[in-house]
Amino acid sequence: MGKVMAYWRELVGGEVEWDKAVYESESETADRNWCLGFMMREDKSWPPCFDYKSTKDLTDTLELYF
């Protein structure tokens, strides 16, 4: 997450806040997002850099989204 936050800081030219409560709320109610992610994985709809052999890339992607 450090790389992502650094990127956003550079984009906005200052500090970026992260709200843990929002993350936890999104993460706890993410059944539909997980379902869509697995459907996209099954259809091979992710970019070429995506690893279809495990669920790590899907987990990383959704955690970043949350």
Image (cartoon, grey):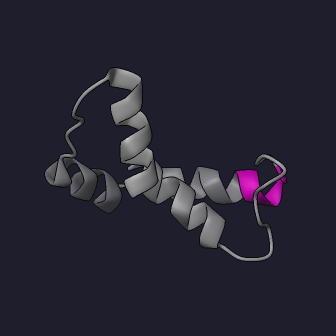
Q: Main secondary structure of the magenta part?
A: helix
Q: Quadrant location of residue 42?
A: bottom right
Quarter of the picture containing the N terminus is bottom left
Magenta-span inclusion, residue 48: no
Locate residue 13, reporting x and y percent.
Answer: 31, 23
Visible in this render: residue 30? no
Q: Is residue 21 above or below residue 60?
A: above
Q: Nearer the viewer, residue 16 or 31?
A: 16
Residue sitting at x 39%, y 30%? 10
Q: Nearer the viewer, residue 62 or 48?
A: 48
Residue lying farthest top? 12
Locate residue 2, reporting x and y percent.
Answer: 38, 56
Residue sitting at x 44%, y 47%? 4
Residue sitting at x 54%, y 66%? 59
Q: Nearer the viewer, residue 60 or 35?
A: 60
What are the residue bounds of the magenta stretch?
40-44
Locate residue 35, reporting x and y percent.
Answer: 58, 57
Q: Is residue 47 above or below residue 56?
A: above
Visible in this render: residue 11? yes
